[in-house]
Amino acid sequence: MNFLRFSRWSLRQKIAGMMVVCVLALGIPTFLVFRHVSAVAEAGKLGTFQSHAVGLSERISAQFYERYGDVQAFAANEAFKGGDLKKMDAAFNQYTKIYGIYDLILLVDPSGKYVSSNTIAPDGSPIAVDKIRERSFANEPWFIAATNGKYTEEKSKGFLGTFFEDAQIDKLVSEIYGRPMYGTAFTSQVKSDTGALLGVLTARPGFRWVEGEVMGLYRQLQTEGLGSTEITLLNAAGTLLVDYDPAVWRSSATLTLLAN
């Protein structure tokens, strides 16, 4: 600003000019500070999401570990070694009610023929197991893998003795329930006390064991003011498994599940 020209201004013009200079002088640093604070806030949110993503992964891993071991625990039940079909059915039905996630627990003999299974759904309603009683499962991937000891294993993490099938529309369970059923499957051998193969047991939980963890994370995000978050879960191959966005669908219990 030219000082000589400024000296000729009226008092009102001088005050107005000084105010403009002050506003510019204060406004630019304020804007820069605002941008910095916004960047820090965004970084904080990213850190929060990363922490929650890691937490969700750990919780699903813990659930997976339990499901992986469940089928072997079921297979060790003495009821499946004595040949009493009523005791077998009763044991399967008890597991179904207690755990609340297994839509089908099925035992077949070493040749792949049906032996026993639960006859009720987790809610206690009867299911149409008659549809599969006369069927041979000898050509099913889970039966072939288990009878040949080809398990899904990771010894460093203690995963031994179970064959796992990734999330998908389970055709076997869907047939029994009369509607598309999305889930996973864990299969293992049933052996005698001497180690002889007595049969193959496959436990097939609905995807509720994963859905519950996703919904729990969303409720946690809501308490942190992040209720507009959309949670998308992919498997190792990049296939979409869960897309959860109740803020858009207006429903806290809506999940989109896609099979491979």
Image: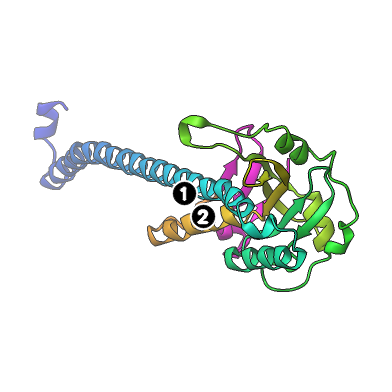
From the top left corner, tell me how far across and down residue 200 is, in percent: 72, 46
Q: Is residue 178 visible?
A: no
Where's the C terminus, which quadrant?
A: top right
Q: What is the secondary structure assignment of the residue under circle 1? A: helix
Where's the N terminus, which quadrant?
A: top left
Q: Is residue 62 magenta?
A: no
From the top left corner, tell me how far across and down residue 54 is, in percent: 43, 42
> How many numbered marks does the figure carry?
2
Which color mode does the image show? rainbow
Q: Amino acid at mark 2?
A: Glu
- The residue at the point 41 percent across, 41 percent down is 50
**Circle 2: is it few (<14), some (14-19), or many (20+) Cα within 10 Å?**
some
Q: Which residues are magenta?
A: 231-260
Left or right of 217 on screen, residue 128:
right
The answer to whether the residue labelled 2 contacts the one labelled 1, judged by CB atoms less than 8 Å apart, is yes
- The residue at the point 33 percent across, 43 percent down is 44
**Circle 1: is it few (<14), some (14-19), or many (20+) Cα within 10 Å?**
some
Q: Is residue 255 magenta?
A: yes
Q: What is the secondary structure assignment of the residue under circle 2? A: helix
| Location of residue 119 with respect to 17 vertically, above or below | below
Foreground pick, 124 / 117: 117
Mark 2 — residue?
213
Sequence-earlier tag: 2 or 1:
1
Mark 1 — residue?
59
Foreground pick, 141 / 35: 141
From the top left corner, tell me how far across and down residue 227 is, in percent: 47, 58
Please identify the residue farthest to the right as the structure is shown: 134
From the top left corner, tell me how far across and down residue 77 is, in percent: 61, 56
